[in-house]
Amino acid sequence: MSHSLSSLTLAATLVLISGAALASSCDPSEADVTDTSIMHYRESKCARKTIEQAKEKFDEGVTLEKRGEMSRMCSNFNSALMQLEQYRRGDWRDNYSRVAKEVDEDFADRLARFEKTICPQKIQLYRHLSSKGDAWAMFRLGSSYAKGIGVRQNDTEALSWFQQAADRDHPDAYMALGMMYSDGMAFAPDYPIAFNWFSKSAELNNAEAQFQLGGMYRKGMGVEKSPKQAVEWYRKAAEQGHEGAKARLKEMYRAKEAKEPLFGY
């Protein structure tokens, strides 16, 4: 093959690759384009079409649920979510923020509905979202392994997924890790580590984490014993209506571990 012919072949190949990279993700019949703005417009149209299709699938799923056809309902819900999920990322979103927002809101609403079911596909969805770096899904996978829901109970797997979610600043994962390290699931308890995770959660005003911190300060677990600090954290939790914290405060007052205030907690 001559040099000029090779150059032409290479050029043609690059054009084809460029066009393929901008092929429509929802309508294969559309001609490939090299203009990014056109492709982004097509993607926004596809996203809006997907929103409508997802609604139809969910509406059908609700009807199937009423008829007791749970397996088909689960398939509909899962299919709709997976269709929407593919439009939760992509360069096109920058220029079509209104459609992107609709996709995100629809996905969140339908995911919340899906969460209320016992559909086995939830685990598949968690894994898929986790592979995309979704901290919420990582936390849900951790919870599934911790409780043995949809998967075989496995504390080591639960710990791994909770840690990955916490590394991405998922607040619920802080509390979950604190409980795992304080209860010693899958390993011996490590109270200093538990204390650190409870502290991160308590700083976000989690009443249960504040309650747990109160107990650690009261008993000197993972931190130097301090009735004063214990009372302070129990009060924070009690002010949020935590019944356990209220009970512990009364215990401490009766045992003269702390002075009971004239008003409040």
Image (tube, grey):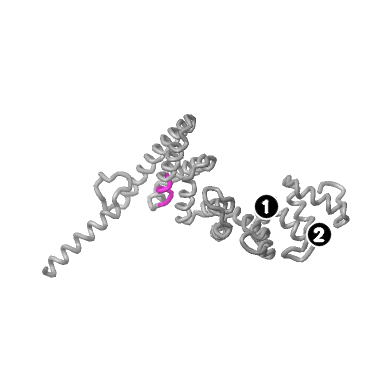
Front one among 115 and 149: 149
Which residue is drawn at the image coordinates 15% and 66% (left, top)?
6
Q: Is 250 situated left or right of 11 in this image?
A: right
Q: Position of residue 208 (x, y in %)?
A: 69, 51
Q: Position of residue 100 (x, y in %)?
A: 43, 46
Where residue 146 appears, as percent x and y from the top left, is 58, 53
In magenta stretch: residue 58: no
Q: Earlier in the sequence, mark 1 or mark 2?
A: 1
**Residue pointed to by mark 2:** 228
Camera-nearest residue between 12 and 156: 156
Q: Which residue is mark 1?
A: 205
Task: Tell me the SS state at disc 1.
Answer: loop
Most foreground residue, 73 or 97: 73
Name the foreground residue: 183 vs 59: 183
Can you name the residue that lies furthest to the left here?
Answer: 2
Query: With respect to residue 38, does 68 lie above or below?
Result: above
Does dot 2 land on a helix, a strand or a loop? helix
Callout 1 amino acid: Asn
Residue 213 horizontal side relative to residue 164, left or right:
right
Question: Which residue extends farthest front?
Answer: 152
User: In this picture, which residue range is highlighted in magenta?
Assistant: 84-89
Main SS type for the magenta part?
A: loop
- Residue type beneath disc 2: Lys
Q: Is residue 66 above or below residue 188?
A: above
